[in-house]
């Protein structure tokens, strides 16, 4: 699984209407298990389902992709069943093991992923649905959903984003043909299908295929497009590895899969400069978009930023992602960016020091100095209490 590309259980989410403006709050996400690292601010995102909100850019792109596949269906291809309300709570088995993701892959680490307990987590990619769907005999489908990754804080990283996954199998292929030949046919079908999909979203653009590696596909490819002067990665895909189909009891059939990030595409298409805007409730943002149409975002005046630095001696197990999490949990969408502005090792004691600069800015309102000072104080205290660092 690439970490850069696209970047619930109990009560049945699958049967609930997809659209909810408010988080439905899942107390079961905060389990008290020693391994549980889902924060309140993350739990509050579960169930919001921006990709189902009418007139929201993420929903507009999702619907464009669905329409493209519906059109192919009208031309005689099998129907792609659409799932956009599957629970984001999944297992290490579905998310990693069944997809042949190595036991020591970074994406499994608690510093990178939100766990409820050692075997239950918030999905890190929509690929986690591949084997469960195939096991149910669903072989042609699209999944859209929110995915969760602990990450840095800046204009293009947010710990929740949205992906779309597509899977198609070809039971009609002559099973007496050598496996490699069938893989070749499926690969060509995949390329033609995705080129058509990208054209239906971006119009006529220059495209190129780049060889890639994903544990779950062989061959694996990435599609890039030349858009507004630069090459841009738009999706990852490939021919599903035989072992994965076999994990789902699909024997001797070949199929393809792809995955893409909806924010990434939307930011480019709608000219949205900051990933946090997708979560904005500001009518100046929300009223700009309309189902079925791609329009360029018209920036409205930004409120001024406020910078605060915090310097400290690192503790033994210090990991930046834990700091980002604490800042996010306290400051929520008031934090725009966190960056390291200084780092050094004391020549005598060998202790390591870092200075982080936090940029506070809210998209929807002005922040007062007093308000930011108060937040910064809580952040500092919380860093000491939770990370064992020593402020300087
Ligand atoms: N799951 C991958 C990611 O999150 C994206 C992806 C790549 C999905 C290739 C696929 C695929 O289905 O075949 O980076």
Image (tube, grey):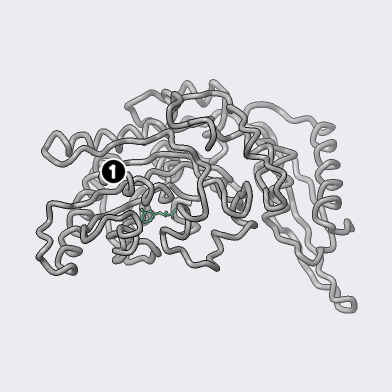
The quadrant where ligand 1 appears is: bottom left
Foreground residue, 165 or 225? 165
- Closer-to-camera residue (305/81): 81
Name the residue: 60% across, 56% down. 112
Q: Position of residue 274 (x, y in %)?
A: 54, 40
Percent across and percent down for residue 129 are 40, 47
Instruction: Please state the horizontal and vertical placement of residue 104, each as a whole percent of the image.
Output: 55, 68
Mark 1 vs ligand 1: CB below 8 Å: no
Instruction: State which quadrant residue 343 falls in.
Output: bottom right
Which residue is rendered at x = 66% and y = 37% of the image? 41
Residue that lies at the very extreme toward the front in this rendered image: 249
Where 163 falls versus 61 (above or below)? below
- Residue found at the very far bottom of the displayed protein: 348
Q: Secondary structure at mark 1?
A: loop
- Above or below 66: residue 217: below
Residue 304 lies left or right of residue 227; in this view the side is: right
Camera-nearest residue between 46 and 29: 29
Tally of numbered tags = 1
Res. 317 in view: yes
**In this picture, residue 157 sits left or right of residue 328:** left
Label 1 neighbour load within 10 Å: few <14, some 14-19, many 20+: some
User: If the image is split into quadrants, where does the N terminus sit?
Assistant: bottom left
Can see residue 8?
Answer: no
- The picture places residue 259, in percent across and down from the top left corner, at 37, 50
The quadrant of the image that shows the C terminus is: bottom right
The residue at 63%/50% (across/down) is 117
* Foreground pick, 43 / 199: 43
Kindly indicate the quadrant of the structure image that contains residue 30. Answer: top right
Q: Is residue 267 above or below residue 320?
A: above
Residue tagged 1: 138
């Amino acid at each position: 699984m690439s970490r850069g590309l696209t970047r619930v259980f109990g009560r049945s989410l699958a049967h609930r209407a997809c659209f909810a403006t408010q988080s439905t709050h899942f107390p079961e996400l905060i389990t008290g298990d020693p391994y549980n690292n889902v924060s309140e601010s993350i739990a509050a995102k579960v169930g919001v389902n921006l990709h189902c909100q009418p007139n929201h850019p993420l929903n507009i792109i999702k619907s464009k992709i669905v329409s493209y596949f519906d059109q192919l269906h009208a031309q005689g291809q099998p129907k792609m069943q659409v799932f956009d309300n599957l629970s984001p709570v999944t297992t290490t088995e579905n998310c990693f093991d069944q997809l042949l993701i190595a036991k020591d892959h970074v994406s499994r680490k608690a510093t990178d992923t939100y766990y409820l307990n050692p075997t239950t987590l918030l999905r890190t990619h929509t690929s986690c649905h591949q084997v469960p769907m195939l096991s149910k005999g669903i072989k042609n489908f699209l999944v859209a959903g929110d995915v969760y990754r602990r990450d840095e804080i800046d204009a293009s990283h947010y710990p929740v984003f949205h992906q779309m996954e597509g899977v198609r199998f070809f039971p009609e292929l002559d099973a007496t043909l050598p496996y490699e030949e069938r893989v070749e046919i499926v690969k060509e079908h995949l390329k033609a299908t995705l080129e058509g999909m990208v054209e239906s979203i971006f119009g006529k653009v220059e495209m190129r295929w780049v060889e890639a590696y994903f544990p779950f596909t062989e061959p694996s490819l990435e599609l890039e497009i030349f858009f507004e002067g630069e090459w841009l990665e738009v999706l990852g895909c490939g021919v599903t590895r035989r072992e994965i189909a076999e994990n789902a009891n699909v024997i001797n059939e070949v199929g393809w899969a792809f995955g893409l990030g909806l924010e990434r595409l939307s930011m480019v298409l709608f000219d949205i400069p900051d990933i946090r805007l997708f979560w904005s409730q500001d009518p100046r943002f929300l009223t700009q978009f309309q189902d079925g149409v791609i329009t360029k975002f018209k920036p409205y005046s930004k409120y001024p930023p406020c910078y605060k630095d915090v310097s400290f001696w690192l503790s033994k197990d210090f990991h930046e992602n834990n700091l980002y999490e604490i800042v996010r949990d306290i400051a929520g969408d008031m934090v725009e960016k966190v960056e390291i502005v200084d780092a050094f090792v004391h020549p005598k004691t060998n202790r390591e020091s870092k200075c982080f600069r936090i940029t506070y800015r809210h998209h929807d309102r002005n922040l007062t100095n007093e308000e930011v000072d108060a937040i910064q104080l809580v952040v500092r205290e919380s860093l000491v209490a939770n990370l064992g660092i020593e402020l300087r």
